[in-house]
């Protein structure tokens, strides 16, 4: 089995954000030894994720961190997604983006939610609670990836993200 990633690679792992691939190991978690990517979140806690290398579903959530230049291009070129009026359909879409979307989908979602938030604020309203939660989740994922790529603190990248949404 060919490895897509190597130890010490920084990767995005779905909604968990930026992780360091600590090692590739063989473990027996229930009667059968398998090869696993061992991931440690870069920005939170002491959790460790064991991602079975033979699971297409879980390895599909792994992707390399984009370079700073790629991020600049994506942020510049991405368009907000078309607003989905039906709440449940919109929440399902946003869940898919958070759980395994690429940088392009995350930026598109953030731009739409940010714009929607501004529109509602102008008329004295707020985003629905679920939309607000997804906006914060998307922002966290983007700032983690941007921080890893630009080698800057997440807090220092917030103005960059907001400016690109204007």
Image: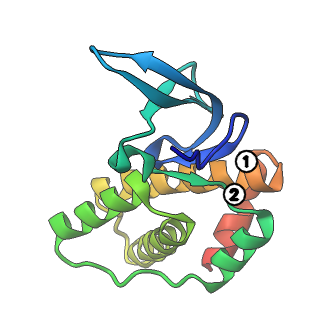
Left or right: 99 in relation to 30: right
Q: Position of residue 115 (x, y in %)?
A: 48, 77
Instruction: Looking at the picture, tell me which residue is in the foreground, 13 or 132.
Output: 13
Q: Position of residue 104 (x, y in %)?
A: 54, 72
Quadrant in the rendering for residue 69: bottom right
Q: Position of residue 103 (x, y in %)?
A: 56, 65
Real-space Cα separation, disc 1 to disc 2, in angstroms: 6 Å
The dot on residue 117 is none
Instruction: Looking at the picture, tell me which residue is in the foreground, 153 or 55.
Output: 55
Q: Residue furthest front?
A: 1
Would you place residue 112 above or below residue 135 in this image? below
Asked if the residue at tag 2 contacts the one at tag 1, i.e. Cβ–Cβ closer than 8 Å, the answer is yes
Would you place residue 107 above or below residue 151 in this image? below
Residue visible at 73% across and 35% down in the picture? 8
Instruction: Looking at the picture, tell me which residue is in the foreground, 121 or 92.
Output: 92
Quadrant in the rendering for residue 117: bottom left
State the count of labels: 2
Quadrant in the rendering for residue 66: bottom right
Q: Quadrant of the C terminus?
A: bottom right
Left or right: 166 in relation to 88: right
Judged from the image, the secondary structure of the residue bearing numbered disc 1 is: helix
- Which residue is identified by label 1? 155
Would you place residue 78 above or below residue 149 in this image? below
Judged from the image, the secondary structure of the residue bearing numbered disc 2 is: helix
Q: Position of residue 1 (x, y in %)?
A: 50, 43
- Which residue is identified by label 2? 158
Residue visible at 82% across and 49% down in the picture? 152
Left or right: 21 in relation to 150: left
Mark 2 crowd level (few <14, some 14–19, many ≥20, 10 Å Cα): some
Residue visible at 55% across and 23% down in the picture? 25
Residue visible at 29% across and 66% down in the picture? 93
């Amino acid at each position: 089995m060919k490895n897509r990633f190597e130890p010490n690679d920084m990767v995005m792992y779905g909604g968990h954000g930026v992780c360091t691939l600590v090692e590739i190991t063989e473990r027996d978690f229930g009667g059968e030894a398998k090869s696993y990517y061992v991931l440690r979140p870069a920005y939170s806690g002491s959790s460790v994720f064991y991602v079975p290398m033979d699971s297409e579903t879980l390895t599909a959530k792994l992707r390399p961190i984009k370079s700073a230049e790629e991020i600049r291009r994506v942020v510049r070129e991405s368009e907000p997604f078309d607003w989905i009026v039906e709440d449940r359909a919109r929440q399902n879409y946003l869940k898919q983006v958070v759980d395994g979307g690429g940088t392009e989908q995350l930026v598109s979602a953030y731009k739409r939610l940010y714009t929607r938030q501004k529109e509602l604020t102008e008329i004295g309203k707020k985003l629905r609670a679920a939309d607000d939660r997804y906006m914060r989740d998307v922002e966290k994922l983007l700032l983690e990836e941007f921080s890893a790529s630009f080698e800057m603190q997440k807090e220092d990248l917030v103005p960059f993200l907001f400016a690109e949404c204007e």
